[in-house]
Image (cartoon, rainbow, N blue to C red):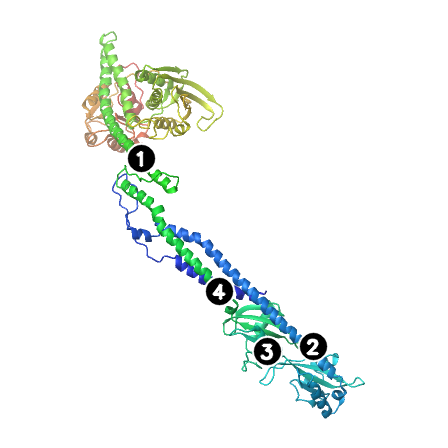
Amino acid sequence: MGELFRRGRLQLLWSHRLEVITAGYSLLHDRTPLPPKEPVRVDSPLALTSPSPLSRQALALSLSSLRTRLLLLVAAAYLPAVGLTLWTISRDREEAFDAVRTHLTQMLSGAAHENDLQLGSGRRIIGTWAQVPEIISGTRAECEATLARLSRFAPSAVLPTRVNTRGEVDCGGPLPPGGTDLVGDGPIAQRILAVDSAVLGMHLPASIDREVVMPLSIALRDSTGRFVGVLSIGIRIGWLGRLASDAELPPGSQLSIVDSTGFVYATLPALPDLVGTRVPGLSAMIEQDRRTMDPRSGVTIRNNRKGIMRLVAYHQLASAEGSFVRLAMVMSPDVAFAAPTERARVRLAFLFVAGAVALVIAWFGAERLVLRDVNAILAATRRLGAGDLSARTGVASTTGEISQLADSFDTMASQLEVRQDRMRHAERMESLGRLAGGVAHDFNNLLTAIVGSADLALDELPIDHPARAELATIKSSASRSGSLTRQLLDFSRRAPLSNAPQRLDAIVQGAAALLVRVMPASVTLDVHTASHKLVRVDAGRIEQAIMNLAVNSRDAMPKGGRLVIELDDVETTSQESPDHPPAGAWVRLTVSDTGHGMTPDVRRRIFEPFFTTKGVGQGTGLGLAMVYGTVQYHGGHVHVRTAPGDGTTITIWLPEASGASDDPSVPVPAVALSEVQAHVLVAEDQPEVRNLLERILTRAGFHVTAVENGQEAITASASPSRPIDVLITDYDMPHVRGDAVALAFRAMNPALPIVLISGFTRDGWPTALLASAATVVMDKPFSAQELLSAVYSARRTTPPSGTPVS
């Protein structure tokens, strides 16, 4: 059908759907205000974020509660049923409308057919009467008598009238409306003259004493064929009343005959005020129907002139040329949709009851099937949040999601217990590290005094003196003890990392010497060093990494086995995998054992901090993480090859030190000392170290001023007996630290040579000091020769050769 019909039908259907959706929304929407959320308070450092305790009623009404979410989920699952019901209701109404449309179309079409039959009968009647001589040319009396006699046999014909060529009625009733147009030069007269059959005129509206009449006119001609007048009769529309009776119009319905100008010819039930008048706005509606729909017949739903929605069915009737007359039936849409509306009420009632039952079942079923286990998990969470790491849910282990959540919580709580033990162990290790760092600092001061005093004593004794051997042993033992302090500082994470060129084979041999003492007799240690190239590494960290790998291998062979450490040179042309080195020159360190090996899962996690497969108290999980971090820091790569029962091989690649020509394993020749008469200010809080520095520098020809803290050093700079040429300061001193002293002196003299010494760390020295070429950093312990070399390096002076120390 046309656009107007679709618009009216959709408007009615959507108004009904909106009512259903509004009712459903009112059912599902929870207008209860949400209770304000209480802040969660966590007092334990290990507490987890857990919901604050809520009352059962507040929990049930909260949109964040599981019960409410379950109800919303049930309501959402019910939406397809709602949509299907609404679609069924819509489809039912559409089918009902189609049935009404078909019925009305057939009924109006039948009425139009009966109208055509009556017109055909009228055409035959007027055609026959137009052949009667008395009607053609008889006198008025003869004509009227003939018409009266013939009318008794044609009850549907009324108002027979003869009009002469002058437009005067000379037989029959009064002049019909428009009778003057039946003759002359008008269009109606021309149509009458042009055809030999009857011409349909304009409809005549119904009145109190008669029904609607359709006039028929035909030309009268004498025996010679000459035009002598026009015969006009009216045909009663007798089928209109029968149509209203057969249709059984419901209350509020109406039948009407109207034309395109809005002129009303007849109505049933009768409306005398409208019949014979033009209704404002009616012609526009008819014209719109003709443009948007089938102009002959159709059914639509639209608002009438008063804005009331009505169902309108119409069918075009035969009418005079140039006019448009149609039969229309108007009724309330509720009449057409009465049965579908009743069925819709039943369906919606069933839908509402079924939805309410589903929500009630979900409300009470949630307590037993869902919330009981969830409350157990919440209770365990609150206990865990309060610091009770032994809290467990107690939910039975099944394959359900809530059971899996409970299992995950229990596993997490167990892991927290383990991590708490590890944290406590790490705290103990941190405390021990701080203690070790302090011990190493003090020990370095003592070693500095021992090494320096041995150097001075050796310089005093002749070459063949029997005590030189004992003094050399003292110096050598003290120097080796320095490596122990470096390990302690490594352990406490307070030692600086250096990248000096080192011979890796010497580091491996030194580590192997230590490993001999820690390996059980059941483990065979094989060391093969085929590389003598230099690498830029921190010797202490690399040695510690070798020790960690060896200890792990030892623990993997509880019943004994073989540990192999190999060192060789490798030239690679391409990178086989991300954990293999790219093309270049590398020194390869391989540590392999014949232990029990590792599974792929363990293999993927061995470098994670705190990950260990050892029992509680047997490992920290930091050893291999330290190995990985050390290798990465030095630009190397690590590869692990292992399998259960097939041992483990860990390969480390370190880049060769390109351009390094100084071999640290080759002794540096002693610097010849001379008397240069430079003024050196020494700031050192340890008396034995301070006295040693003063003796070494004095014997070398320097003028020395020694102070015991930073404040005295700054005071001495304010009024020196002579200009200060070199500053030697310790880092850790009371009152004012060494870095502040050095910065104060450098502010007074930007070119002042400064030697920074520390038995602790070089990380604390300001970058502004370290970036200067006139700054040299020394780590304790050091020898007299190393001290004087640092002073000369800071001053950038080359002493004359051949000058003895004493």
How far apart are the two marked residues, 3 and 4, measured between alpha carbons? 31 Å
- First in residue order: circle 1 vs circle 4: 4
For residue 193, say whether it is visible: yes
Amino acid at the residue labelled 2: Gly
Mark 4: amino acid: Thr
The answer to whether marks 2 and 1 mark residues whose Cβ atoms lie closer than 8 Å is: no
Whole-Å distance between the Cαs marked 2 and 3?
Answer: 20 Å
Instruction: Tell me the amino acid under the disc marked 1.
Output: Ser
Report x, y in % for residue 425.
Answer: 27, 30
Q: Residue 785: image x %, image y %?
A: 28, 18
The mark that comes first in sequence, 2 or 1, is 2
CB-based contact (under 8 Å), mark 2 and mark 3: no
Numbered badge on residue 414:
1
- Does residue 422 lie above or below 274 as drawn? above
Q: Is residue 622 above or below residue 372?
A: above
**From the viewer's perspective, is 729 left or right of 188?**
left
Which comes sooner in the sequence, label 2 or label 3? 2
Front tag of 3 and 1: 3
| Of marks 1 and 4, the one in the foreground | 4
Depth check, mark 2 against mark 1: the one in front is: 2
Give the alpha-carbon distance from disc 1 to disc 4, as whole Å. 64 Å
Q: Quick one: label 3 or label 4, which is nearer the N terminus? A: 3
Q: Position of residue 176 (x, y in %)?
A: 65, 86
Label 2 vs 4, first from the N-terminus? 2
Marks 3 & 1, CB-CB < 8 Å contact: no
Q: Which amino acid type is marked by label 3?
A: Gly
Does 261 sit left or right of 740 as displayed? right
Q: Which residue is mark 2?
A: 120
Label 1's element? helix
Element class at badge 4: helix
Which residue is identified by label 3? 241
Tell me residue 756's x, y (percent). Answer: 27, 27
